[in-house]
Amino acid sequence: MGRQLKGLTPPLIEFIERQKMFFVATAMEEGSINLSPKGLDSLRVLDSNRVIWLNLTGSGNETAIHLSHNDRITLMFCAFEGDPIILRLYGNAKVYGTENENWNKHIQLFPKIVGSRQLVDVDIEKVQISCGMGVPLMDYQSQREGLLDWAEKQGDEGLEKYWRKKNVTSIDGFETKKE
């Protein structure tokens, strides 16, 4: 049976900090629901009701597009080792591009990662903990380097061109709203 909390506890923050990946779900009022895995060293807990993550260049920009239309978001962490835990964070989020003052305020929390394009700042309204007894045990080997290698090869100019070509509309044809 799941439990709901109003915020993260110290043990839950430690759990999040140990995870190698997490999942993000967003949806607009219409169109497709987006569910994306996130990895690398891209998430920080700011306090018991706030997390922020560094959104990297990808094949689309669904999360940012969805959030520009509807700020609801869910993050999910699941234990692939250790105690069987599934942790969901429900809340609202804002997206900060590289020109936003909040980008400058928070980017130093993260290592320099080529292809960084946005920060997603999540205000947590509800935390849910449930058992993960159905989640398989898996051994972590390493982070994949392909995304980083690709972004490095593009360079700043190539990434800007890619964003203009691939990251301005959602898979359903909705445009990103400008900040």
Image: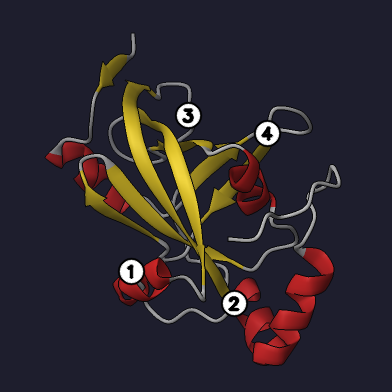
The answer to whether the residue labelled 2 contacts the one labelled 3, judged by CB atoms less than 8 Å apart, is no
Residue holding disc 2: 115
Name the image quarter holding residue 165: bottom right
**What is the C-alpha distance between the residues marked 4 and 2?**
25 Å
| Residue 130 location (% of width, % of height) | 35, 20
| Number of the front mark, 4 or 2 | 4
Q: Residue 34: where, in percent of width, then height?
A: 67, 39
Q: Which residue is mark 4?
A: 28
Give the spatial CA distance, label 2 vs label 3: 31 Å
Confirm or deny contact between disc 4 and disc 2 (CB under 8 A): no
Instruction: Work out how far the residue at label 1 is from the one at label 2, CA to CA, in angstroms.
Output: 16 Å
Could you tell me if residue 84 is visible in this image? no
Question: Which callout, 1 or 2, points at the residue further toward the start of the chain?
Answer: 1
Categorize mark 1 by other alpha carbons within 10 Å: few (<14), some (14-19), many (20+).
some
Instruction: Identify the mark at residue 135; answer none if there is no mark.
Output: 3
Residue type at tag 1: His
Q: Amino acid at mark 3?
A: Val
Say which residue label 1 marks.
106
- Residue at left offset 68%, top offset 33%: 28
